[in-house]
Structure formats: structure tokens, C-alpha cells
Image (tube, rainbow, N blue to C red):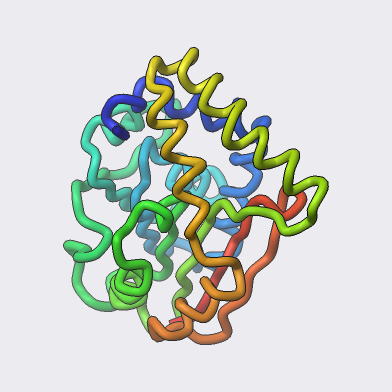
Amino acid sequence: MFTDIAPRYDLMNRLMTLGRDQVWRRTVVQLCNLPRGGRLLDVATGTGDIGYEALKQDATTRVVGMDLTREMMVRGQGKVAGLSFPFAEGDALALPFGDDAFDAATSGFMMRNVTDIRRAFQEQARVVRPGGRVVCLEITLPNTPVFGALFRFYFFKIVPFVGGIITGQRSAYTYLPHSALKFPRPAELASIMTSAGLRDVRYRLAMLGTVAVHWGTK
């Protein structure tokens, strides 16, 4: 599915979020609290937006972007003039890196797509040094009745329609909203992160409660 939507993935992200996804990724990098020259692993990096944002904030950051879909990473290579970092193929549930190898690990809109959320967080915690952070950006469905209904109409009706026009893959943009239905609520996701070995887990909501950023410390 991600192979099929790779050519228009970035464009659809901007359209679906009204361009706000770039702001959220900026927040993700800031919450990593990286030292100068720090090491960052972006899991399910896609076309590398979080990695590029990290380099924009500090060009000395040593970024590795990892994804299961090669075509997404191919699209990301060289897409920002003057910036680059290595991409690697890998599984979020079995990261191909040693213990304590990074100062922080991030993921953007990945956790809805893994078969074992706790295991994914455990793997990210494993490869992060003690005192380092794990930061997760994800969609969450708002609880407020009126806005919640409006958002669901947009997310489940408009997004698949527009996705079908832009990418020719309506089924992919039907799957993506539905992947949020059974995804843990923010407080529950924070508990999963704690059970995975992270401490001081916190989260903040954005975009009227439709997006959540979680972070915790190893």
C-alpha cells in the first residue's frame, strides 16, 4: 500500500493536515532534546520529513531514517537541497541497531500500522541510550461530540475521496482513517509506553485534539 502511494505521499500529507504536519514534526524534534551532534533514529521515516527537520534545526545531528518500504525512502533521498542522511530498510519490531546506539528515536504516524505497539516502543527504547527520549506522533480521534462528528466526516469521507483523486489509491486512504478507530487513546498509549520501559511519559494534543505527541525517557 505504501509503495503505491509513495509518489504522492508528501502532497497528501500536506493536503490532509492543511500543512500543519510540518509544525508537528518540528515539535517532535524539539521534544527529542538532542545534544549538539546527537544521534537520531527516525523509525518508519517514509520520505524522511522528521529527519530533514532535525537537520534544519541542527545540521550537526546524525540522523538515520529507517523504513520497511524502499519506495518511500527512494522518494525521500535528496528531496531537500543541501541536506542528506542515510536511509536503511528495517522492521520496527526488530530494529537492526545495537543497544544504546542513539540519543533519541522518533516515529511519525507509524504506530497505527504495527502489529505490536508495546514491542515497537520496547525496540525504540532499547536502541536509545539511558536518559534519551522516544517521541511518537500519531492521529487520535477527538471526543467532543460536535467537532468529533465533523472530523469523522472529513477523515472518513473527504480524505478517501481526495486521496483517490490525487493518488489513484482510494483504498489506501480508506484504510488510513480506519486504522485510527481501534488505536489506543492518548492516556492508554502513554501507559503502553510506560510498560515498555519508558519513564516520565507525557503527551500533548494538537489540531483540536486530532493529533497527539507522546514522549518518554529511557
Position of residue 25 relative to residue 100, above or below, is above
Q: Quadrant of the C terminus?
A: bottom left
Position of residue 173 relative to residue 143, above or below, is above
| Residue 32, horizontal then vertical, whole percent | 53, 65
**Left or right, residue 154 beside residue 164:** right
Position of residue 74 relative to residue 101, above or below, is above
Residue at x 42%, y 64% (from the top left corner): 38
Q: Quadrant of the N terminus?
A: top left
**Pick the front one: 112 or 69:** 112
Residue at x 49%, y 60% (from the top left corner): 183
Quadrant in the picture for residue 84: top left
| Residue 159, horizontal then vertical, whole percent | 57, 28
Residue at x 67%, y 50% (from the top left corner): 210
**Pick the front one: 109 or 125:** 109
| Residue 76, horizontal then vertical, whole percent | 35, 32
| Residue 216, horizontal then vertical, whole percent | 52, 76
Position of residue 190 relative to residue 199, above or below, is above
**Left or right, residue 177 beside residue 120:** right
Task: Judge whether residue 6 can be spotted in this image.
Answer: yes
